[in-house]
Image (tube, rainbow, N blue to C red):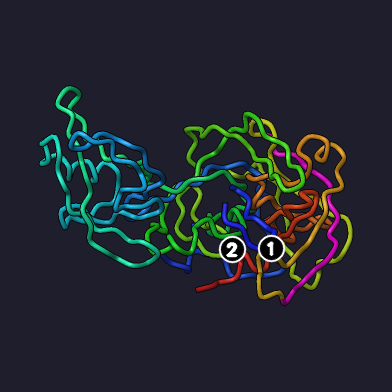
């Protein structure tokens, strides 16, 4: 998780023409559904390293030329986009010891290096000492479904780290997720939802920006609650609610109090501050937990925003984004 001072993003991405322009008399369908968000890397990310035998010696991770968080973007001068592509390029290396030319991106600097690879004849596998990942995924919450153009928005903040933004495909998929358990938040320790991804695809992601993930849904949402959105100037300090899932797929309502509003905040993901007041939610989760990102905030029967951040040293308090900002067309 990426930290900003004492705050963390909770989760835990092309055309802008599919994103609705803000209108204060607009109605949408209320979200609150727990979802799994999947975006593909445009390459393969090194998430860790482990020692392995090479030329009769145990090659330790600190001896590797490749490092954790490097993005492998080519092997043998061939562009790769997945772990499958990576191993396909290794198929021509069937010697016990090989040095394979690869291209990596490290902190936005592209460089060519060699990767030590050991081919195991007994199981016909290549050993590289690398843990690899080719997609970015996380659990979040849908904020709204817009029936006028069958679009949705979720999360309320960026899922992509700036250092990786050039290597993540904007298009992806969003699925229903089933919450099987959750851990409780405490001061300086943020809990999280634990979920299984269902086979129920909600739709396709077409864009990710600082205010969430957006896309087109393919499900029937006519049974969901229709709700009016509201402008920043109508949001006030006082009682409100968030909608989120704690068990299974059931969306529940929990009480909060909006404590401050910053309509002109340069960090639009933190335009609203609030405190959890719902006794049941506080008892169960200790406050805000990862996976609540995108949970819609309702005040006076209108959709005013979405949950985005949690205060690490006091997880009963958090930030939200104005719905007006989520609906803005932003480059």
Q: Position of residue 84 (x, y in %)?
A: 26, 41
The residue lying at 48 percent from left, 40 percent from top is 201
Mark 2 or mark 1, earlier in chain: 2
Please name whichever residue, 83 or 170, is drawn nearer the observer in this view of the structure.
83
- The numbered disc on residue 321 is 1
Mark pair 2, 1: CA separation: 8 Å
Residue visible at 49% across and 55% down?
Answer: 215
Secondary structure mostly seen in the magenta stretch: strand
Tag shown at residue 225: none
Relative to 254, is 327 above or below?
below
Q: Is residue 263 magenta?
A: yes
Q: Is residue 268 left or right of residue 93?
A: right
Badge 2 crowding class, 10 Å Cα cut-off, few under 14, some 14 to 19, many 20 or more, is: many
Residue 289 at x, y percent in the picture = 69, 44
Find residue 121 and report its horizontal and vertical position in percent.
14, 26
Q: Is residue 207 above or below residue 33?
A: below
Per the image, the residue denoted by label 2 is 211
Report the span colored magenta: 250-264
Q: Secondary structure at mark 1?
A: strand
227 displayed left or right of 212: right
Disc 2 + disc 1, Cβ < 8 Å: yes
Foreground: 294 or 150? 294
Badge 1 crowding class, 10 Å Cα cut-off, few under 14, some 14 to 19, many 20 or more, is: many
């Amino acid at each position: 998780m990426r930290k900003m001072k004492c705050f963390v993003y909770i989760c835990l991405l092309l055309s802008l023409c599919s994103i609705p322009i803000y209108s204060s008399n607009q109605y949408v369908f209320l979200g609150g559904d727990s979802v799994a968000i999947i975006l593909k890397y445009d390459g393969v990310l090194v998430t860790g390293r482990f020692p392995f035998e090479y030329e009769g010696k145990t090659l330790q991770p600190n001896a590797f030329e490749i490092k954790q968080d490097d993005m492998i973007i080519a092997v043998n001068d061939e562009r790769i986009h997945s772990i499958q592509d990576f191993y396909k390029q290794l198929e021509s290396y069937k010697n016990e010891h090989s040095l394979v030319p690869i291209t990596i991106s490290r902190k936005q600097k592209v460089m060519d290096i060699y990767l030590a690879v050991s081919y195991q004849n007994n199981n016909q596998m290549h050993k590289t000492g690398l843990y690899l990942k080719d997609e970015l995924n996380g659990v979040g919450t849908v904020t709204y479904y817009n029936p006028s153009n069958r679009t949705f928005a979720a999360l309320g903040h960026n899922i992509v780290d700036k250092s990786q933004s050039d290597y993540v495909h904007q298009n992806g998929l969003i699925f229903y997720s089933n919450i099987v358990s959750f851990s409780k938040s405490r001061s300086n320790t943020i809990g999280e939802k634990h979920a299984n991804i269902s086979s129920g695809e909600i739709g396709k992601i077409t864009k990710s920006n600082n205010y969430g993930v957006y896309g087109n849904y393919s499900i029937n949402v006519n049974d969901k609650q229709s709700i009016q959105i509201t402008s920043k100037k109508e949001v006030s300090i006082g009682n409100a609610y968030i909608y989120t899932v704690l068990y299974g797929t059931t969306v529940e309502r929990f009480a909060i109090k909006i404590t401050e509003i910053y309509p002109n905040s340069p960090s639009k993901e933190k335009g609203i501050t609030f405190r959890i007041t719902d006794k049941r939610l506080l008892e169960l989760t200790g406050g805000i937990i990862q996976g609540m990102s995108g949970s819609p905030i309702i005040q006076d029967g209108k959709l005013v925003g979405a949950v985005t951040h949690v205060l690490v040293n006091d997880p009963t308090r958090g930030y939200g984004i104005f719905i007006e900002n989520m609906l803005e067309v932003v480059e």
